[in-house]
Amino acid sequence: MGGGNHTTHTISVLVENKPGVLARVAGLFSGRGFNIESLTVAETDDPTVSRMTIVTSGDAKIMEQINKHLNRLIDVIKVVDLSTEKFVDRELVLLKVKADAEQKAEIMRLVDIFRGSIVDVSPRSYTIEVTGDEDKIVAFIDLMRPFGILEIARTGRIAMARGHKAL
Amino acid sequence: MGGGNHTTHTISVLVENKPGVLARVAGLFSGRGFNIESLTVAETDDPTVSRMTIVTSGDAKIMEQINKHLNRLIDVIKVVDLSTEKFVDRELVLLKVKADAEQKAEIMRLVDIFRGSIVDVSPRSYTIEVTGDEDKIVAFIDLMRPFGILEIARTGRIAMARGHKAL
């Protein structure tokens, strides 16, 4: 991943940490029919500023519109389309999978290969944590599917430009 | 963490993967003055269903209102306040920190202790990935601060009930 293809874009948005900002951003996307594949929002090191990561898709014209409209919103400080440069992206998934006695060893092997960890155990299930780029996460989910996925929670992507430069 | 205190609540919301759902949920929170500490939304294993994790705060009465209003929203399938049971919660952070020659060894030691990994390197900075519950993430950020944090991106919390039970 990193760099992405020509349709998927990863956008970092710095916003004032105030009520209503997320509603305005989400409303902009839905009101104009822009797609949201995933979205995360959490505080930065400065508690007055939050950072959103939005994964969206569209051609150059749509991306220009998204960028323009986001920049016009109240409380939006900065918008960067990371897909225009080199970036690191990561996602975290929690996955609860059926784990009967005869399956446990094989599940453990796969967790090890993916450098994941088992964060909860019940007599018939494991809850697994895995981190990686989207390809890795999707590959892991595909490998778990035959065992019986009981539940899945993904954070969606966060991302950062490579190198010394900061947002 | 897990279980949380009486004011912070972690809510899992299953929603139809349709445009406008996030805007309605975010609008509900901002319109009624409910706080959002962090929010993630991404697809589940079923591409027609997305899962949101919202970290919010309030007393029992406010939580009851949030629950009631969320359940009334179109395209909301299920709402569970995980804070009423035992749950596992995790968060992922990407952190870019200044790393001059004389600081690199100490930063590496801290990354190892926190079982993090360095995902990008420039001559004067490291970009580090760390996963954990909120206490661990906050502790790691506090330890990196003296080196000079250049940039930070947090996913916000995802969570899942302990044991075999699924949402």
Image (spheres, coloured by chain):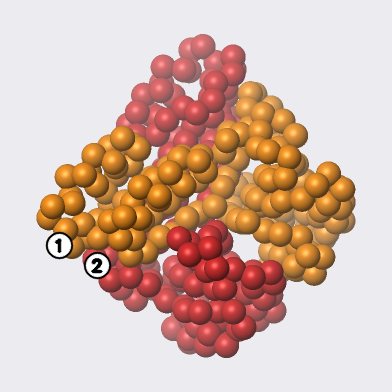
Chain colours: A red, B orange
Q: State the image quarter where residue B10 is shown.
A: top right
SS type, badge 1:
loop
**Horizontal placement of A18 versus A7: left or right?**
right
Marks 2, 1 in one chain: no
Task: Tell me the residue that label 2 is attached to.
Answer: A164
Q: Are marks 2 and 1 in contact (CB under 8 Å)?
A: yes
A156 left or right, relative to B163: left
Q: Does residue A141 appear anywhere in the picture?
A: no
Pointer 1: what residue?
B123
Regarding mark 2 in the picture, which secondary structure is present there? Answer: loop
Residue B39 drawn at (x, y percent): 61, 56
Residue B22: tell me if it is visible: yes
Residue drawn at (57%, 73%) of the image: A16
Of residues A129 and B131, which is closer to you in this image? B131
Tell me the amino acid under the disc marked 1: Pro
- The amino acid marked with disc number 2 is His
What x and y, as percent, mark residue B28? Answer: 79, 64
Instruction: Read off the chain for label 1.
Output: B
The image shows residue A22 at horizontal and vertical percentages of: 64, 69
Where in the figure is residue A128, as x and y percent of width and height?
Answer: 49, 32
Pick the quarter of the image with the N terminus of chain A. Answer: bottom left
Judge from the rendering whether residue B85 lies leftward or rightward of residue A67; answer left or right: right
- The residue positioned 46% from the left and 47% from the top of the image is B138
Whole-Å distance between the Cαs marked 2 and 1?
8 Å
Residue at the spot 51% in from the left edge and 11% down from the top edge: A101
Q: Disc 2 sits on a residue from what chain?
A: A
Tell me: residue A91, above or below residue A77: above
